């Protein structure tokens, strides 16, 4: 199981929880044959943001049955009813054996929901809960004692996201306690962490990329009647790209800063939906151009919305109180660096291909249509809180 | 609508089935069965649950704890289920690690450690146990076995010889015979096994099965695979839960080019990683058959994915029990000689049985690692190991070396 490896480092806020779930679930698709016999593991995903630790904890039902005798009628089959009737006891049992501390002070779990999921070796109870730490989390201590007295082979596989970094750790009876965050700080390392997260986010955040591509695709062309024609010379395309990228950057940096400092507040469902809408609009503009020459204005206006999306990510990472500006600058520079790297690959490629029919017809028209359709799906997902597509 | 757009939509739709059960859910119906517990396929476990409660109530009762730990170890072996090893370990956890630790506790701890291939930790427990009670037969036999797996043959030989005094002829003969079979003294191994079989009662299931497996090992080393298969089947008819024998039989069948036989010997055994690997190898052999290869492809894909997931899960928790199998999976199933060589080398640093020689040799040949081949060649010479397959691999290598 490669949850740690496949989960994006920094999922967008409203997707965060779902991202975890979907990553875990991808593994299930392979579960078709018989279930494995393996040593006992639980999977503990923690994400610190603000004062709160969001947790998802997958514990094998078989292991819980061994200590709680969930199988009430003793027939060797666990029904949902048998588990549900013991729900509060089960949750209590688990939470009693996990303690989280922020800078020495205990975090108080708020009982969340109990769900069921499958892993390679059977069905798991999935505990989702938030723990309130009372102050902004910057140093987290995890004390893990689940099954410590009954199964010496049990391990808790911890995956923690804290202040822009992802940690993995194997916890068990021999090593139940681990601390994260405090002493691995150092302003530079933190800065580097945010920088990296920014780069990763722009490279894996397809909505931002597709928006940018939609605006950049026509930079090497001009509209002649109903058709796209190749521009001569490099001057005009480069000027166009610089204007679009600069406008996008200035705009999203502005709103990113405003939102991070709490001056501007927009619910993530609205900002995320608007981002999807911006991709639809930018892509459709390539098929039926409304805005032809001044696309940088579009880049600026919609860039303001994308900045709000970046702010959601940054907020999810759990920001250090003392170093908010540092985090902001690091993350923003990361986004810009990632963006420039992509433009540096995109521009020569599109310039070289601009005279081909493939680029002017297929990429410009069909490609843009495809982008618009995908973004329309995102828009529906985000606006109505649905899920059709794999987590992106 | 243009082709491009259709393609985009198609891509989106292609992912949908994979997401059908893509997240944790809350069942709606109370009567829906969400998990099958081990007790369902192994009713003997019910008694263990009760004993465990008793032991928890009276933790000072050494004999009850030892009995429960033994039953858990037995269950782990019978069901190929490492969770029971964790339970056994916890049952014995209350005794501190000092000079007052009861010898039997140390020996059982060593057996648990051995089962998870932590050989050096097992040896430490056994050394301590034998320091307290030098003639303890179980400790001597376990230490001889672990030393043999680690390739420390002279020390293993000493323990087997000591067993003659404390455990009697049969156990000592099997111990010495096992050692003889991996050090090229095949005639001796065979006669010790046959002699032991003649002088043990029919009721001694595990020793009888061991003797047949030993004779089968000798036949395998001699290249007499048909005879080895016959002996392993005989051993399995005595002890159907002997997973070592079952895996060995599958290997012989694979070498004999009889993958269908492997499918029937591994039917309903998918919970056991080692047997699932053999099954996948058999399926792979079947897909390469011209006549009906395509039939098996789907099953092979599923088995391979299962294996990969399990090895990844083991890796996540830092489990190094199945390195030999992991190497074989990489070499034959994934066809990644470099990864196989890395695993086989790591495995070689932990265990040195003929099967470990073979997988490292095969991986080293595939990855053109002359250093490993040289090391193995020297090892075979030094230990006297006689095995037709390994000899052929080394000879083939020498021939290739001459050509190039």
Image: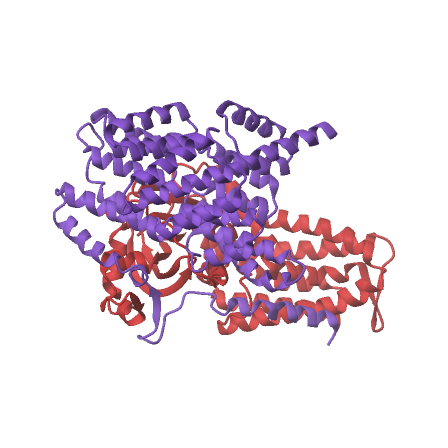
Chain colours: A red, B purple
User: Is residue B342 shown above or below B269?
Assistant: above
Q: Choose between B92 and A224: the one closer to the eye.
A: B92
User: Is residue A19 shown above or below A277?
Assistant: above
Q: Position of residue B213 (x, y in %)?
A: 41, 42
Task: Answer whether residue B120 is visible to the viewer in this image.
Answer: no
Could you tell whether B227 is left or right of B146 in the image?
right
User: Is residue A162 shown above or below A309?
Assistant: above
Could you tell whether B398 is left or right of B39 in the image?
right
Q: Choose between B317 and B213: the one closer to the eye.
A: B213
Task: Answer whether residue B362 is visible to the viewer in this image.
Answer: yes
**Residue placed at 19% from the left, 52% from the top?**
B52
**Residue placed at 50% from the left, 26% from the top?**
B384
Direction right: furthest residue: A232
Q: Choose between A147 and B383: the one closer to the eye.
A: B383
Q: Position of residue B214 (x, y in %)?
A: 41, 39
Could you tell whether B316 is left or right of B42 in the image?
right
Total number of numbered labels? 0
Could you tell whether A312 is left or right of A131 in the image?
right
Q: Choose between A249 and B241: the one closer to the eye.
A: B241
Q: Position of residue A134 (x, y in %)?
A: 30, 52
Q: Quadrant of the C terminus of chain A?
A: bottom right
Q: Position of residue B212 (x, y in %)?
A: 40, 43
**Residue placed at 32% from the left, 44% from the top?**
B206
């Amino acid at each position: 199981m490669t949850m740690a490896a496949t989960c994006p480092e920094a999922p967008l806020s409203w997707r965060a929880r779902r991202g975890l779930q979907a990553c875990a679930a991808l593994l299930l698709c392979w579960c078709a044959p018989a279930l494995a016999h393996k040593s006992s593991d639980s999977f503990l995903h923690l994400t610190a943001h603000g004062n709160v630790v969001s947790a998802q904890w997958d514990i094998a039902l078989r292991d819980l049955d061994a200590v709680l005798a969930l199988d009430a009628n003793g027939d060797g089959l666990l029904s949902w009813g048998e588990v549900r009737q013991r729900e509060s006891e089960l949750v209590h049992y688990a939470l009693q054996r996990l303690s989280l501390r922020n800078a020495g002070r205990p975090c108080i779990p708020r009982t969340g929901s109990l769900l069921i999921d499958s892993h390679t070796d059977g069905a798991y109870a999935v505990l989702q809960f938030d723990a309130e730490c009372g102050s902004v989390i910057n140093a987290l201590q995890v004390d893990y004692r689940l099954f410590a007295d009954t199964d010496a082979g049990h391990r808790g596989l911890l995956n923690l996201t804290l202040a822009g970094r992802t940690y993995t750790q194997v916890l068990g009876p021999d090593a139940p306690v681990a601390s994260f965050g405090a002493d691995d700080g150092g302003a530079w390392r933190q800065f580097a962490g945010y920088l990296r997260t920014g780069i990763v986010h722009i490279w894996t955040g397809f909505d931002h990329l597709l928006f940018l591509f939609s605006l950049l695709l026509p930079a090497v062309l001009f509209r002649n009647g109903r058709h796209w024609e190749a521009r001569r010379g490099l001057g005009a395309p480069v000027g166009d790209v610089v204007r679009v990228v600069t406008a996008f950057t200035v705009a999203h940096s502005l709103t990113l800063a405003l939102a991070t400092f709490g001056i501007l507040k927009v619910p993530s469902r609205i900002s995320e939906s608007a981002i999807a809408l911006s991709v639809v609009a930018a892509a459709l503009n390539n098929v039926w151009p409304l805005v032809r020459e001044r696309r940088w204005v579009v880049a600026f206006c919609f860039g303001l919305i994308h900045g709000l999306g970046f702010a959601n990510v940054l907020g999810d990472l759990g920001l250090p109180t003392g170093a908010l500006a540092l985090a902001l600058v690091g993350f923003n520079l990361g986004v810009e660096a990632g963006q420039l790297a992509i433009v540096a690959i995109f521009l020569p490629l599109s310039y070289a291909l601009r005279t081909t029919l493939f680029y002017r017809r297929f990429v410009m028209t069909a490609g843009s249509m495809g982008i618009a359709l995908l973004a329309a799906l995102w828009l529906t997902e985000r606006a109505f809180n649905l899920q059709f597509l794999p987590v992106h | 609508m243009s082709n491009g757009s259709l393609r985009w939509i198609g891509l989106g739709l292609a992912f949908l089935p994979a997401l059908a059960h893509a997240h944790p859910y809350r069942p709606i119906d109370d009567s829906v069965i969400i998990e099958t517990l081990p007790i369902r396929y192994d009713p003997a476990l019910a008694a263990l649950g009760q004993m465990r409660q008793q032991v928890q109530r009276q933790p000072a009762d050494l004999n009850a704890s030892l009995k429960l730990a033994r039953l858990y170890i037995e269950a782990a072996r019978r069901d190929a289920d490492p969770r029971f090893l964790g339970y056994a370990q916890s049952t014995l956890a209350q005794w501190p690690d000092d000079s007052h630790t009861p010898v039997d506790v140390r020996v059982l701890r060593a057996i648990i450690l051995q089962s998870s291939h932590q050989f050096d930790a097992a040896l430490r427990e056994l050394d301590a146990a034998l320091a307290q009670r030098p003639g303890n037969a179980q400790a001597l036999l376990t230490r001889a076995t672990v030393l043999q797996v680690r390739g420390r043959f002279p020390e293993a030989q000493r323990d087997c010889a000591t067993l003659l005094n404390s455990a009697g002829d049969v156990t000592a003969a099997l111990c010495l015979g096992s050692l003889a079979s991996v050090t090229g003294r095949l005639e001796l191994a065979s006669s010790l096994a046959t002699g032991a079989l003649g002088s043990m009662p029919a009721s001694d299931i595990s020793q009888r099965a061991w003797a047949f497996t030993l004779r089968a090992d000798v036949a395998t080393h001699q290249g007499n695979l048909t005879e080895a298969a016959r002996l392993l089947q005989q051993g399995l008819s005595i002890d159907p839960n002997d997973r070592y024998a079952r895996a060995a039989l599958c290997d012989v069948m694979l070498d004999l080019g009889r993958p269908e036989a492997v499918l029937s010997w591994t039917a309903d055994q998918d919970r056991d990683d080692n047997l699932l690997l053999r099954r996948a190898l058999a399926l792979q052999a079947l897909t390469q058959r011209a006549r009906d290869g395509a039939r098996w492809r789907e099953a092979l894909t599923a088995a391979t994915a299962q294996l990969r997931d399990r090895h990844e899960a083991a890796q996540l928790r830092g489990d190094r029990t199945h390195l030999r199998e992991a190497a074989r999976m990489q070499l034959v199933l994934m066809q990644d000689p470099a990864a196989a060589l890395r695993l086989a080398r790591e495995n070689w640093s932990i265990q040195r049985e003929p099967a470990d020689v073979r997988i490292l040799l095969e991986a080293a040949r595939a990855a053109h690692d002359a250093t490993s081949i040289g090391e193995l060649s020297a090892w075979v010479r030094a230990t006297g190991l006689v095995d037709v397959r390994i000899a052929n691999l080394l000879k083939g290598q020498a021939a290739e070396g001459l050509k190039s």
